[in-house]
Image (cartoon, helix red, strand yellow):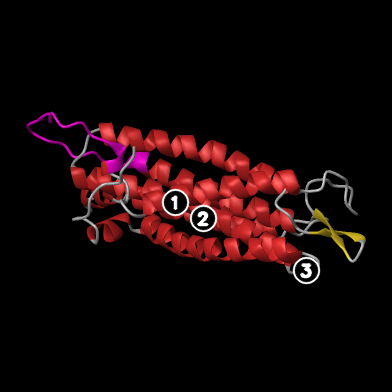
Amino acid sequence: MLDTVPLRSRFLDHADHYARWSGLAIGIVAAQQLVTMESGDITMPLVFAITAFGLCAVGGVLFGDALTLRTQETVRSASLTPRLVRDQVPPRMAPLLLVQAASLVTLLVIGAVTASSEPDRIGRAGRVITVTCEGLRTSLGPWPGLYYSGPMFAALAVGTPICAWALRRIAHGPGDDQQRRDRAWAITGAWGLLVSSQVLLVVVMIFVALTENACAGPLGAATLVVTFPLGLLSLFSFGWSLVTVVAPRAVDDEAAGEGGFAGE
């Protein structure tokens, strides 16, 4: 008779890894299905795909955190030093992701304000920006107006509070310091995937719209100069977040001696 206890124990020890990887896999499959769906607008399926991938990554990490086995201590001890979220999250990347989230919200608000409120050629408002080019009114798009930003705002509104709640629960919950840090890094990485992927999409939309023809003008050129570095930064943070979700301990070990993030 085969002994199944070790196999079951190994599975439970790595259940959080399987859940995180499954969330990424489900997100990739869902994104592929959404990208290929029939639509009169080629950009909206991409918006849905990016949003679904980010939410699936967050869901997989949160489910994996719920499955994480807590360290059982024979003697429990209490520390007088309060546990703070800032001591668990990545000290350098967490502020960077917060800056990107603020930049994303700012770009979406600006896009919503500047987008044309008149229906375009397919009868949809809030998806192009109207400029004057050689005395003629010209529509440039796709533009991150309300038509496209709605799903992005919704994803942020759902994912951000849940991740923040999970980080607080980890900081004040059971487990050793290394375990709490690994779990907090994984959740930060999942939220980073949600934010950085949407920033990349918005930057690409702005780039395509403003380089469609020569009608963007000096203001359009200045916008490209500002958003291009943000796109590069988001590309880097997307890669970091993906690696962190897949293997948070490997990333964390490199920064074990660093200080904490200066804000809860």
What number is the disc on residue 122? none
- 262 or 199, nearer to the observer: 262
The local secondary structure at tag 2 comes to helix
Of the numbered discs 3 and 1, the one sitting upstream in the chain is 1
Q: Magenta residues? A: 65-86
Evaluate if marks 1 and 2 touch, with contact meaning CB atoms under 8 Å apart. yes
Residue 186 placement, left or right of 175: right
The local secondary structure at tag 3 comes to loop
Q: Residue at coordinates 76% horizontally, 64% vertically from top-left?
A: 216
Specify few, some or many for label 1: CA neighbours under 10 Å numbering under 14, 14-19, or 20 or more.
many
State the separation of the CA atoms marked 3 and 2: 24 Å
Residue 227 placement, left or right of 190: right
Specify few, some or many for label 2: CA neighbours under 10 Å numbering under 14, 14-19, or 20 or more.
many
Splitting the image into 4 quarters, where does residue 166 fall?
Answer: top left
Q: Identify the residue under disc 2.
A: 196
The amino acid pointed to by label 2 is Ser
Is residue 157 visible in this depiction of the protein?
yes
- 100 vs 72: above or below: below
State the separation of the CA atoms marked 1 and 2: 8 Å
Q: Identify the residue under disc 1.
A: 97
Q: Position of residue 249 (x, y in %)?
A: 27, 56
The local secondary structure at tag 1 comes to helix
The amino acid pointed to by label 3 is Glu
Of the numbered discs 3 and 2, the one sitting upstream in the chain is 2
Residue 247 placement, left or right of 62: left
